[in-house]
Amino acid sequence: MKNYFKNLLSTTFLAFTSIAFSQDNVKEFEINSKNGLVDENGTELVEPKYKNVKKLQYGKLFLLSDGSDADVYFNANTKKKLLLDHLSWDVITMNGKPHLKYSDKADKKTFLIDINDDQIIPLKQYYHSIKSVGDYLLTMVEPKKLPAKPEPKIIDKKTGLPLIQKVPEDRYSEDFIVYKNDGKFVPIFKAYAKNFYPLYEDKRKVTKENNMVIEEVKIIDVSEQNSENFDYLALSDYRKNNDILIYDSKFKKVGAINYDGLDEYKISNLASEVLKKELSVSPFSRSGISPVSGPGGPMRVDYPHLIIEKNADGKNILYQVKSETEKLALFSTSNNIDVYGSSKINIETKDKKDDAGFSVGVDSGKIYFPKKYWEKFNMN
């Protein structure tokens, strides 16, 4: 059961306020560390058999995976459910619309799916990864074998016969391609690369030790789906002893770093020497909000809220407390139950063989747990 709440905390929520949706129509639930989906009426939408679940807040999109079978794509707005092989959970913003990538590795085919309307877009090339960064799509592709480069014939001066030539090395096309982010997929830059690192300059002046004023440069994790164009692009070139080549925003080479198996922190440090600017791996500063202590006095009670009470028969009852004088029983069980946060319920059978986790609408009183499992957990 701990996994349920761990998954909830680790789930990434991305908000696009331009798309409206119902807040409480679909929720995750869990049985014995396996996740599924349920609607507000208690109807099971996805069977609980997936280890991982991720919710993308815009479009109310849920992605579920168990590491073996096809991933589940469920759009709560359109009620579309798809089973997709090798679904990437990184959002690709193309032409202002959010997309996801999935691939058929056996047939070497790649597709994009528009999250707004579930439209599937086949691509002409097989892509290992596609990242949207500002006006560009940064991609890693499956390289194609090129025709062997013809070797000049060498004649033995004594015999006049051609010498035995060495077998030419295999040649492959570039595997890193940059496109303009317009959906046309016309290449504007190609290179050989194993990894790529967009670099961003922070135009703000930063005062460091000894009152030295410098410009801070930051290396950005592209999974952040940046809307800003990069100022520099660092590529690891595996053909040249894993050198890091640095390009400017016009894709002109401006420097190189010799390295051997460095992580991106060290790459940023060495790149700072080349660019004569300070680098940081942190994508953006994130400031938490500290709790504010108010003046002493009685704690305020918000309504409605959930509580658990035992009745005379020893059963646990979950109540929705609507006011000081009004409360509504939502369900009872002889099993152990707990409330986590304001709306997360954990229930465990007495023999501790089975457990479940689900949500309850604090305002609506709706129970996001399929009715088919109520008997298993002695709920009524």
Image (tube, rainbow, N blue to C red):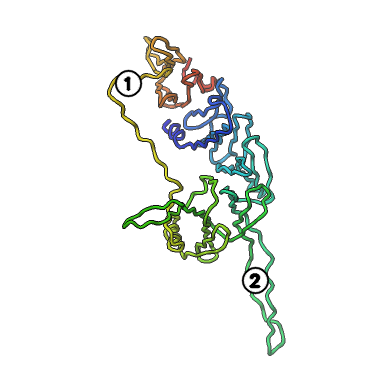
105 or 292, which lies in front?
292
Q: Position of residue 351 (x, y in %)?
A: 40, 24
N-terminal of the pair, mark 1 or mark 2, is 2
- The nearer-to-camera label among 1 and 2 is 1
Residue 161, placed above or below residue 89: below
The number of discs equals 2
Furthest residue in direction bottom, as rendered: 158
**Label 2 CA crowd tier, 10 Å (few <14, some 14–19, many 20+):** few
Q: Disc 1 designates what residue?
A: 299
Name the secondary structure under disc 1.
Answer: loop
> How far is disc 1 from disc 2 in space, using C-alphas?
80 Å
Looking at the picture, does residue 133 appear above or below residue 144? above
Quarter of the view holding residue 59:
top right
Amino acid type, residue under disc 2 in the picture = Pro
Q: Secondary structure at mark 2?
A: loop
Judging depth in this view, the residue of 59 and 61 nearest the camera is: 59
Task: Tell me the residue at 43%/30% (across/down).
Answer: 1
**Snapshot quadrant of residue 303:** top left
Mark 1: which amino acid? Met
Q: Residue furthest left?
A: 296
Residue 280 drawn at (x, y percent): 42, 53
Which mark, residue 378? none
Read off the residue under disc 2: 168
Q: Residue at x 38, y 56 (%)?
A: 213
Percent across and percent down for residue 252 are 57, 62
Circle 1 residues within 10 Å: few <14, some 14–19, many ≥20 = few
